[in-house]
């Protein structure tokens, strides 16, 4: 009976979209890391990226897993739209960081950067995967150039919805802040 209850709890955590802890309007924690774009390492600092416009910061569990590959493909296809709106896309994870250079080429299609982040960064964004605490959950934030959260969206089992939600948030910000 205990196993059945534990299994039901685990499935409910996977099935229902959760709410990210950082709320709209909160300040996004700054962080620095090494990112990969087209297989090449480059420094990434959130506060520097925000100088160029909004940032779509998406956390994903691990490179080369089915949902993360789907999400990377979808973000790669949408990156020209985000760029046209002045937004930068970056995917971050704590899982399989040794594979990020290859993931950036093959699955992100050299369209946007991906990076490994520390457990502290995952904690700061409340993006820890409950069922595997060493990994990040699937959480997307859109952050305005002033560092404020415009969107906080979590849906582990629906990687495609993150792209549409992020586009909506960037579009709304762009409408309120024309170039």
Image: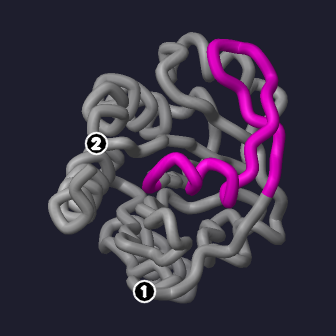
> Where does residue 119 sit, x and y in percent of width and height?
81, 65
Please give left or right for residue 157 compared with residue 160 in the image: right
Residue located 60% across and 69% down the image: 127
> Where does residue 56 sit, x and y in percent of width and height?
45, 52
> Where does residue 151 sit, x and y in percent of width and height?
36, 70
Please give left or right for residue 155 compared with residue 138 in the image: left
Q: Nearer the viewer, mark 2 or mark 1?
A: 2
The single residue placed furthest to the front in the displayed view is 179
At mark 1, the secondary structure is loop
Residue located 30% across and 55% down the image: 166
CA neighbours of label 2 inside 10 A, class few (<14), some (14 to 19), many (20+) = some
Q: Is residue 112 above or below residue 55?
A: above
At mark 2, the secondary structure is loop
Which residue corresponds to mark 2? 85
Which residue corresponds to mark 1? 25
- Displayed quadrant of residue 29: bottom right
Residue located 52% across and 47% down the image: 52
Q: Is residue 124 magenta?
A: no
Q: CA distance from mark 2 to mark 1?
A: 20 Å
Q: Is residue 161 visible?
A: no
> Where does residue 132 sit, x and y in percent of width and height?
68, 63
Q: Is residue 41 above or below residue 14?
A: above
Q: Is residue 34 magenta?
A: yes
Of 104 and 43, the residue lying toward us: 43
Q: Which mark is residue 138?
A: none
Looking at the rendering, the stretch of residues picked out in magenta corresponds to 32-54
Residue located 40% across and 45% down the image: 87
Please give left or right for residue 129 compared with residue 154 in the image: right
Q: How many marks?
A: 2
């Amino acid at each position: 009976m205990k196993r059945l209850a534990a299994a039901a709890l685990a499935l409910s955590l996977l099935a229902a979209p959760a709410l990210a802890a950082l709320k709209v309007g909160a300040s996004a924690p700054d962080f620095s890391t090494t990112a990969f774009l087209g297989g090449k390492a480059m420094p990434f600092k959130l506060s520097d990226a925000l100088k160029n416009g909004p940032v779509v910061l998406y956390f994903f569990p691990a490179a080369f897993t089915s949902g993360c590959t789907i999400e990377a493909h979808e973000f790669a296809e949408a990156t020209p739209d985000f760029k046209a709106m002045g937004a930068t896309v970056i995917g971050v994870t704590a899982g399989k960081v040794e594979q990020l250079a290859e993931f950036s080429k093959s699955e992100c299609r050299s369209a946007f950067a991906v990076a490994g982040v520390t457990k502290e960064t995952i904690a700061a964004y409340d993006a820890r995967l409950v069922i595997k605490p060493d990994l990040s959950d699937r959480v997307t934030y859109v952050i305005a150039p002033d560092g404020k959260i415009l969107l906080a969206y979590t849906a582990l089992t629906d990687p495609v919805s993150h792209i549409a939600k992020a586009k909506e948030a960037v579009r709304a910000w762009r409408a309120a802040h024309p170039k």
